[in-house]
Image (spheres, rainbow, N blue to C red):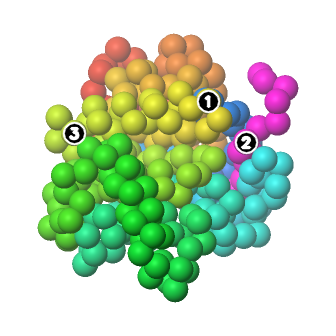
């Protein structure tokens, strides 16, 4: 384990829904330059843990720290401003704006550029260039002027990633980033995620059911089961561990399709 301060840390993070403990005292540290996959059966608490980290849900107990700063009391937008980036399954896209306009808004938000400033032609040009660069990164350069509502689902998911890139976060949180994408679109996103990790100063968290994706990208796998962290370590070791085998109800670790998904 690195002695360097973790970029992101959850300490005893917990949430109860009525009597049900969906995330149960989960403590974990994430260091820069690493990609960690979070796996576990349906209902294990993966998305809920993400929601607690990004601030969509308020913890019943425990803390979320970013570079040692306690963010637990902050709203989701404040946490985003501090550097927690999350793709929100399309809910943060403006459907009646173009792809370019969506990313331009994110670039403006990142740099706290207000409307009046934006009206100046030189700034607008600069914003547009930056936004186009993000769109190109996700292979949407050719669709910049399309209305979001008219884009296929896979392109909307790619646009979400462009928005997250535009916010220049310290932590990238991907929740099943390739779900609903066609086979030829998947590598674009997976390559992009691998590139983000290569930047070395970012933390990447990935909730993913597809084990081949988890294997190919991860430095580390964390397993949640019934809201508890039950395994944490190097991919090969974790996949082979009895606790994972049991959690997946006898599923073979060699099965390349989906991990405990339905
Ligand atoms: N807002 C909520 N109110 C009540 N229960 C909730 C709420 N959100 C999640 N839960 C419950 O918390 C548990 C964890 O759900 P969560 O969606 O985090 O699991 P998951 O591991 O992401 O599952 P999946 O792989 O199916 O997406 C489930 O039992 C779920 O029903």
Which of 182/106 is in front? 106
Callout 1 crowding tier (Cα within 10 Å): few <14, some 14–19, many ≥20 = few
Asked whether the beta carbons under mark 2 and mark 1 sit within 8 Å of each other, the answer is no
Is the residue marked 3 within 8 Å of ligand 1, measured from its CB? no
Up/down of 204 relative to 160, above or below: above
The quadrant the N terminus occupies is top right
Image-based side of 178 in relation to 12, left or right? left
Mark drawn on residue 185: 3
Can residue 62 be spotted in the picture? no
Who's the residue at 63% across and 22% down the image? 233
Circle 2 SS class: loop
Which of 20/46 is in front? 46
Q: Distance between the residues labelled 3 and 2?
A: 30 Å
Up/down of 72 relative to 31, above or below: below
The quadrant the C terminus occupies is top left
Is the residue marked 1 within 8 Å of ligand 1, measured from its CB? no
Which of 2/109 is in front? 109
Give the magenta range.
Answer: 1-15
Mark drawn on residue 7: 2
Which residue lies under the disc numbered 1?
200
Circle 3 SS class: loop
Q: Distance between the residues labelled 3 and 1?
A: 25 Å
The first of marks 3 and 1 along the sequence is 3
- Residue 19 in percent (x, y) is at 63, 65
Q: Residue furthest bottom?
A: 116
Up/down of 113 relative to 68, above or below: below
């Amino acid at each position: 384990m690195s002695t360097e301060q973790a970029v992101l840390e959850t300490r005893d993070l917990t949430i109860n829904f009525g009597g049900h403990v969906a995330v149960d005292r989960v403590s974990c540290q994430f260091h820069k330059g690493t990609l960690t996959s979070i796996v576990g059966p349906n209902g294990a608490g993966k998305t809920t843990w993400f929601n607690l980290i990004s601030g969509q849900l308020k913890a019943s107990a425990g803390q979320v720290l970013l570079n040692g700063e306690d963010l637990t009391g902050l709203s989701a937008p404040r946490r985003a401003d501090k550097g927690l980036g999350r793709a929100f399954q399309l809910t943060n896209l403006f459907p009646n704006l173009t792809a370019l306009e969506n990313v331009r808004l994110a670039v403006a938000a990142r740099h706290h550029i207000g409307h009046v400033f934006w009206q100046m032609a030189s700034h607008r040009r600069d914003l547009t260039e930056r936004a186009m660069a993000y769109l190109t990164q996700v292979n949407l350069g050719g669709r910049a002027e399309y209305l979001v509502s008219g884009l296929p689902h896979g392109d909307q998911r790619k646009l979400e990633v462009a928005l997250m890139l535009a916010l220049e976060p310290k932590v990238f949180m991907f929740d099943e980033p390739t779900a609903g994408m066609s086979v030829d679109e998947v590598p674009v996103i997976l390559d992009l995620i691998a590139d983000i990790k290569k930047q070395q100063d970012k933390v990447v968290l990935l909730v993913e059911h597809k084990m081949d994706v988890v294997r190919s990208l991860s430095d580390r796998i964390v397993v949640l089961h019934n809201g508890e962290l039950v395994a944490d370590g190097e991919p090969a070791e974790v996949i082979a561990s009895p606790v994972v085998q049991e959690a997946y109800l006898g599923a073979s670790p060699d099965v390349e399709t989906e991990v405990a998904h339905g």
